[in-house]
Amino acid sequence: MADDIRKYLDGVVKSLPSEEMYFESIREIMKDLIKEYIKKKLNENPELKKELASIVEGFLEAKIKEYDSMAKMVKITAKIGFLSAPESVRDVATKDFVETFRKEIEEIILRTL
């Protein structure tokens, strides 16, 4: 009988969520409370809210510039690689590139007509 009770209690304990799940839940609740507090403070101070909006705008602009720079780097790297490749490889690469993007190129052309 005592063994049955022990097995039953072990089963109950094993079915409970882990400590980690509780800690993660508490972290999420804390994050929500902090968000609410910050929103309240921003709504109380329109000047601060405006300043934050300006900062976020600058941050997004910087990220866009970063992605633009990365795209330019990829483009110049591809050009250098293409020009330094042997002629036979260039022909195959050009054919593969066109085949890969044919559908997208056709859609762009059709939209511009």
Image: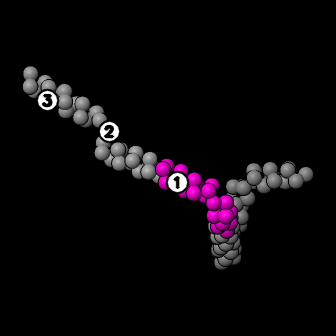
Q: What element carries label 2?
A: loop
Residue occupying the point 67% across, 60% down: 46
> Where is residue 22 drawn, in percent x and y?
35, 44
The numbered mark, 2 or 3, whose residue comes first in the sequence reads 3
Q: Which amino acid does label 2 sit on?
A: Pro
Disc 2 to disc 3, C-alpha distance? 19 Å
Q: In the picture shown, does residue 78 fall above or below 20?
A: below
Can residue 88 be seen at all in this image of the molecule? Answer: no
Q: Which residue is drawn at 67% across and 76% down?
A: 80
How is colour applied across the structure in the image? one colour
Graded by Cα atoms within 10 Å as few (under 14), some (14 to 19) or many (20 or more), the crowding at tag 3 reads few
Q: Label 1's element? A: helix
Which residue bears the numbered disc 1? Answer: 37
Residue 26 counted in the magenta span:
no
Q: Can residue 29 be seen from the camera position used here?
A: yes
Verify whether residue 33 appears in magenta. yes
Q: In the figure, is residue 2 to the left or right of 65?
A: left
Query: What residue is shown with label 3?
Result: 6
* Residue tagged 2: 17
Q: Position of residue 61 (x, y in %)?
A: 69, 67
Q: What stretch is highlighted in magenta?
A: 32-58
